[in-house]
Amino acid sequence: MSASAEIFVVSGPGAGHLHPCTELCLLLTRHGYRTTLVISSRVSSDIPPSFASNPLITVAPIAASFHPRRRVSDPHNQSANQELSAHLEKRTAGSELPRVLCAVVDLKVWTAKEVFRKFDVPVISFFTFGACAAAMGLGSWRARISDVQPGEARLIPQLPEEMAVTYSDLKRKPGPTGGDGPPKPGDQPTWVLKVEGSIGLMLNTCADLERPFLDYMGDQMKMPVWGVGPLLPEQYWKTSGSPISDREIRQHTHESSCTEDEVIQWLDCKPRRSVLYVAFGSEMGPEEEEMVELAAALEETTRDFIWHIGPPRYGADFSDRVESKVGDRSVIIKGWAPQLLILSHPSTGGFLSHCGWNSTVEAIGLGVPLLAWPIIGDEYYNAKLVVSHLQVGYRVAEDMSQVVKKDEIVTGIERLMCDEEMHERAASIKAKFGHGFPASSSAFDAFRDFINARL
């Protein structure tokens, strides 16, 4: 099969898209397929050399950028599609090359579907986020949930009772500058139109975490749905309790104020489960007013913590003030942070997170409970999954439409770090992944049988 079958994977920009797509390529090769990864040339330097040197993988950088918020006819998307089309034309000219079975297209770059249709290549739409977020968005729209009143919990037919939509679920702050903003209650999810014409849906999750939501998606969308994740580095599933070295498994060109060695030396000196990790991803976070509240809360709490500031974007640097006040009980990281190392270290006992999907599954799989502080989009539903369904976290505040205050943050930190029952539940979920890649991701076998049947 490997000599005559190839699958294209088209990735959106940013680590939250690139990392799952590279892991998907590796997973495909382990099942005997050749793969071509189509990416923006801007992020090609973030691909590990070991990935690019894999003989079953071809990397096809695209100089032009796909713009997901613009129409297919937009000049930027047209330019990117022309580059991809040229690559496929050149490729099909060589009869000795393997047949393209299908293309797995990240929803972020959904307009690429048009190119594969011209070459009669079937498309599978790829969700880099989880099934809960997709199912809740779809269910809220189809159930026309837009008028929930205070004190009410509106059930979505066929979804778990604990996921009933409440008044507070619908109250959200506007998205940060440059973000998509919150979906309007009752609006059709943007992905519904983006998956039109697909022969199936692939999601970065597994049934052990999200079975009812995967089942719902398959039932509602009337097409095959495969949970093939969580798509994390192979070393993640082989930790055997030892910290994971990001440096060894993920290529990055970003500067950092701390080395991995400095971080691990500090963690090694701390008691088990005593450290709080605070991070909001690499793209956006709380607005400046809330950063002031967060800084004050970290100063007030007595907990040891690692605070990943990320790239400067808030107009003020709070880290120097906090660092001077809390001394040795903190490590403040500016720039890139070794997140897998921190989450996998036994001294880490909690994660104050925006609940981006990659961060969420990294923490859950390592048994680290979360204090959820969602900012945009699917993060709100990821937080609800963590708090209400899996019960391995708390919300930082009940009303996310208001500025999160210092006292709420301090209270949330203490609840998170002291809740023994929650830590036990987190450990039981971690144990499901103790023998490596989730067994429930055997959905990949169903995908293989489906796609091979099309030969």
Image (cartoon, rainbow, N blue to C red):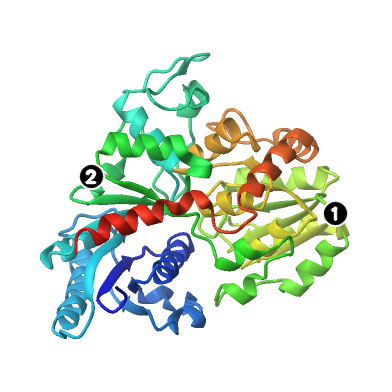
Q: Is residue 391 left or right of residue 137?
A: right
Quadrant position of the N terminus in the picture: bottom left
| Res. 409 image quadrant | top right
Where is residue 339 shown, x and y percent of the image? 64, 61
| Residue 402: x %, y % from top left | 56, 31
Residue 234 is left or right of residue 229, and the answer is right
Q: CA distance from mark 1 to mark 2?
A: 50 Å
Find disc 2 in the rendering and name its residue: 193
Left or right, 273 with reference to 190: right
From the viewer's perspective, is 156 left or right of 413?
left
SS of the residue under disc 2: helix
- Could one spot residue 334 in this view of the protein? yes
Whether residue 379 is visible to the viewer of this picture, yes or no, is no
Q: Position of residue 405 (x, y in %)?
A: 67, 35
Residue occupying the point 25% across, 43% down: 223
Q: Nearer the viewer, residue 432 or 54?
A: 432
Residue 211 or 167: which is nearer the viewer? 211
Residue visible at 65% across and 59% down?
A: 309
On screen, 290 above or below 89?
A: above
Q: Amino acid at mark 1?
A: Val
Task: Name the residue that disc number 1 marks.
Answer: 326
Q: Residue at x 49, y 14 (%)?
A: 152
Q: Amino acid at mark 2?
A: Leu
Q: Quadrant of the C terminus?
A: bottom left
